[in-house]
Image (tube, helix red, strand yellow):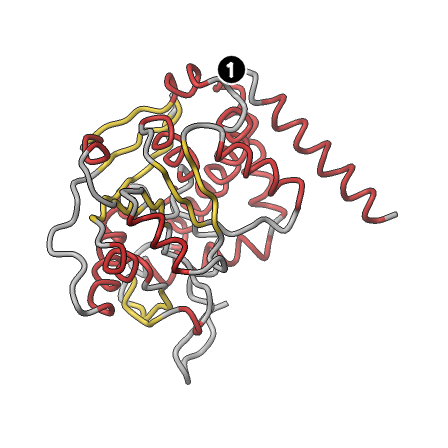
Amino acid sequence: MLTSLSKLFSRLVLWLVRALGRLPLPVVRAVGLLMGWLLFVLAFPRRKVVLVNLRVCFPQWTRMQRWSVALQSFVYFSQSWLDRGWLWEAPAAVLEQRLRRVGNWQALDQPGPVIIFSPHFYGLDAAALAVSLRTARQCTTIYTPQRNLLVDAWAARGRRRFGDVHLMTRFDGVKTIVSLLRKDGLLFLLPDMNFGPEESIFVPFFGIPTATVPSLSRFARMGRARVVPLIARMTAQGYTMEMLDAWEHFPTDDVEADTALMNLRLQHWIATMPAQYFWVHKRFKTRPAGDAAFY
């Protein structure tokens, strides 16, 4: 009975999000604003996670600054979730109107394997679609499956509907991912997450030793690939995706130094739009032996 009710509720939510996606973008964003305020008040455990993350990363901020950015973060989180109603459903012409590309997108036209490093800003799904709309090259995306199977299936359909996109989880094996990359492919990679001590190394992030997946350096070396950052920013008109120049002298023979450099550059991007980073994730859940827990 509970399973049936859960499926019914999931179908209702997905129907509402998809229906909302057909409305003008200002309406979608207004609903997301209200939803963000509501979640900020009601989702106390997750609000605590966001506030702890901001306190650790920005100790110079006042309490009022942290709460203000935390509220903005919940709003961006909600708006980006509702945006998937049009990102994964609307015609390509609508997406091209709302997804603005700036920077060095010609990097995708150059031959050879490419890793697109797209950190966990709330516009990450918009960035992935902007890539698949822009290139005919095979693009592999490593993602974390959703617990809700209905949402997971909807997300998979939405992410694959343009271009030649291969969706893989981090459990699918390195050899397959590297093989696809070496075939002049693109790898859309989001390694700035905490997946526990077994898959991570500790490198600084905002001055804190932080468990970080070293996959960017390792995949770049194994796939003999260039690393091209892609930064997604939410705007009133949709999203602006900035493709930066490929990193020079990367990777090196030092995986730890490469991963620390990744975090350092990520810090600079976060500083330009701190409320749009994925602070709802327990980024500091895994601590070095003997260190106190943060959450």
Residue at 17% x, 44% y: name it: 246
| Residue 61 shows up from this direction | yes
Q: Secondary structure at mark 1?
A: loop
* Residue 73 placement (x, y as % from top left): 45, 43
Residue at 21% x, 63% y: name it: 258
- Is residue 268 positioned above or below 287 on the image? above
| Residue 33 shows up from this direction | no
- Is residue 153 positioned above or below 142 on the image? above
Type of residue at label 1? Answer: Pro
In the image, 74: left or right of 147?
A: left
Residue at 39% x, 78% y: name it: 288
In the image, 231: left or right of 245?
A: right
Q: Nearer the viewer, residue 154 or 260?
A: 154
- Is residue 89 positioned above or below 122 on the image? above
Quarter of the rendering containing residue 259: bottom left
* Residue 111 placement (x, y as % from top left): 19, 38
Residue at 53% x, 19% y: name it: 27
* Residue 133 placement (x, y as % from top left): 37, 26
In the image, 137: left or right of 21?
A: left
Quarter of the rendering containing residue 185: top left
Disc 1 designates what residue? 24
* Residue 78 placement (x, y as % from top left): 53, 37
- Is residue 200 positioned above or below 180 on the image? below
Instruction: Give the residue furthest to the bottom.
Output: 290
